[in-house]
Amino acid sequence: MLLRKYGPTYAVTMILYFAFMIVCGMMGVKVNQLPEIVQSVAYTLPMTYISTDFVEFWEKGNYNFGPLFLSTIFLGIVSLVILFFRIKRSNKIKK
């Protein structure tokens, strides 16, 4: 919906995908090795908790899922706001 063409939309999607993976510590650099500003951004994304904390969950079986749920809700709200504004913009263009 953002770019209306498959190629540019796919490019933006892949850029976001790999940026999220790098920031969340899934591409070789751990989250605690990143600058503090990037760490604060990383902890708003649910993938950070999956890549760092789930090893402890599998080994010990005890885990606080609160931060994971909150970050998932935050990412969902951001996505819905972007979708809402895009739909409103699309309706204005059609009229």
Image (cartoon, helix red, strand yellow):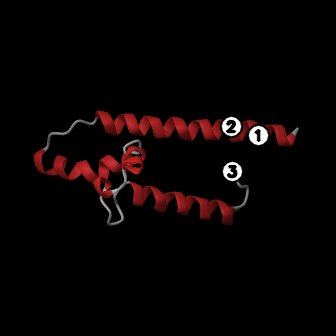
For marks 3 and 2 on the same chain, the one whose residue lies earlier in the sequence: 3
Q: CA distance from mark 3 to mark 2?
A: 10 Å
Q: Mark 1 vs mark 3: which is more N-terminal?
A: 3
Name the residue rendered at 45%, 55% in the picture.
20
Residue type at numbered disc 2: Phe
Q: Taking 7 as reference, is 55 above or below it?
A: above
From the top left corner, tell me how far across and down residue 68 is, in percent.
33, 39
**SS at circle 1:** helix
Crowd rating for badge 2 (residues with CA inside 10 Å; few <14, some 14–19, many 20+) = few
Spatial CA span between label 1 and label 3 = 10 Å
Residue highlighted by disc 3: 2
Q: What type is the residue that disc 1 sits on? A: Arg
Q: Is residue 39 left or right of residue 14?
A: left
The label on residue 89 is: 1
Q: Residue placed at 79% from the left, 38% from the top?
A: 91
Pick out the residue farthest to the left.
60
Decide if residue 94 is on the left or right side of residue 35. right
Q: Secondary structure at mark 2?
A: helix
The amino acid type of the residue labelled 3 equals Leu
Q: Which residue is mark 2?
A: 85
Residue 46: where, in percent of width, then height?
38, 45
**Which sits in the foreground, 39 or 5?**
39
In this rendering, the answer to whether 25 lies above or below 66 is: below
